[in-house]
């Protein structure tokens, strides 16, 4: 999976040939800029797409450039892949600009996909707890290897409530490789509330865990319980299952109006 960084720009302090695997020394301390979103370090499996650009003595772009993939170590960038997207591998002199930039190939490959979207769903009354079932009558499961470092999963659910019972709570249950990893922090809708939106975003910033954040941007009277974020020990190599869980008291009727799951690659 490709990594990206904002304002990752530096200059070569020595020359490189056109061969793959060349190690390009860059301006002292600038290597720290070449780190992925969320602090993810580059690696052979997760390089950063960069552009080498020739400049003249006044710093003006001469028009010559090469698209490469790099792995950073300190103030050195290993040019792992050369001459990408139709460019030609070339020798570059000291003073050449190297920066992480959006390229045509990256733009064409980037995508966001809504995996599941449902609306006009169920309404249930009484003392109960229910799991919001996904397509096919089961929780939504992503197979092992579906996610890579840099991917993001966002899920959003809208609930309404009629009645004046004490509260309704909603959360998102996560199962990793068949093991229930517990319940994420949840939101409570008190007696005075009648509408709740739950949004949970998972960012796969490591091969060993996913960082998540929760919010309820549109609601009446709902409050966060147990915080609004943290980490789950979700290996991106494992199968991951997600399911919304809602609980409520007698006297209320709870309706799930809409939910969706959206995946963005390489954010």
Image: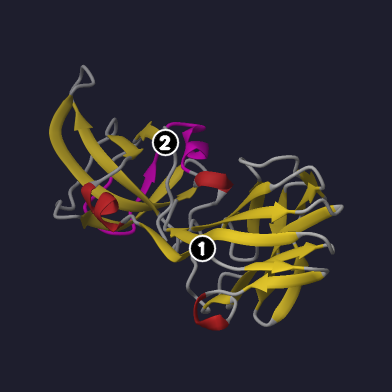
Which residue bears the numbered disc 1?
120
Quarter of the image for residue 233 reads bottom right
Label 1, secondary structure: give it: loop
* CB-based contact (under 8 Å), mark 1 and mark 2: no
Between 176 and 87, the residue placed more toward the observer is 176
Which residue bears the numbered disc 2?
8
The Cα–Cα distance between marks 1 and 2, rounded to whole angstroms, is 45 Å
Tell me the mark number nearer the camera, choosing from 1 and 2: 1
Label 2, secondary structure: give it: loop
Between 245 and 202, the residue placed more toward the observer is 245
Horizontal side of residue 266 vs 63, given as left or right: right
The verdict on residue 20 being magenta is yes
Residue at the far right in the pictured view: 166
Can see residue 234? Answer: no
The verdict on residue 159 being magenta is no
Residue 184 drawn at (x, y percent): 74, 59
Residue drawn 32% across and 38% down? 98
Which stretch is magenta? 16-34
Horizontal side of residue 121 vs 76, given as left or right: right
Residue drawn 27% across and 34% down? 96
Q: Is the magenta stretch mostly helix, strand or loop?
A: loop
Residue drawn 49% across and 67% down? 147
| Label 1: few (<14), some (14–19) or many (≥20) C-alpha neighbours in 10 Å | few
Task: Give the mark nearer the N terminus: 1 vs 2.
Answer: 2
Residue 32 drawn at (x, y percent): 52, 38
| Vertical relation: 9 (above or below) 192 | above
Residue 15 drawn at (x, y percent): 28, 41
């Amino acid at each position: 999976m490709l990594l990206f960084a904002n304002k990752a720009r530096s200059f070569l302090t020595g020359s490189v040939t056109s061969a793959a695997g060349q190690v390009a020394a860059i301006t002292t301390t600038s290597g720290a800029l070449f780190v992925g979103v969320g602090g993810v370090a580059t690696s052979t499996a997760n390089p950063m797409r960069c552009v080498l650009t020739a400049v003249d003595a006044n710093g003006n772009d001469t028009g010559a450039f090469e698209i490469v993939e790099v792995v950073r170590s300190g103030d050195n960038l290993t040019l792992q892949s050369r001459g990408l997207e139709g460019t030609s591998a070339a020798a570059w002199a000291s003073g050449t600009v190297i920066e992480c930039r959006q390229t045509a190939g990256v733009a064409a490959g980037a995508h966001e996909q809504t995996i599941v979207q449902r609306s006009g769903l169920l309404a249930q009354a009484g003392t109960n707890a229910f799991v919001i079932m996904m397509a096919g009558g089961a929780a939504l499961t992503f197979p092992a290897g579906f996610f890579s470092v840099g991917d993001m999963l966002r899920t959003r659910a809208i609930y309404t409530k009629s009645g004046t019972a004490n509260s309704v709570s909603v959360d998102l249950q996560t199962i990793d490789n068949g093991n229930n990893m517990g319940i994420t922090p949840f939101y409570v809708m008190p007696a005075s509330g009648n509408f709740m939106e739950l949004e949970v975003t998972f960012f796969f910033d490591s091969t060993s865990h996913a960082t998540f954040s929760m919010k309820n941007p549109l609601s009446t009277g709902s409050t966060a319980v147990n915080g609004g974020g943290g980490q789950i020990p979700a290996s991106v190599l494992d199968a991951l299952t997600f399911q919304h869980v809602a609980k409520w008291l007698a006297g209320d009727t709870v309706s799930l109006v809409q939910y969706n799951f959206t995946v963005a690659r390489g954010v």
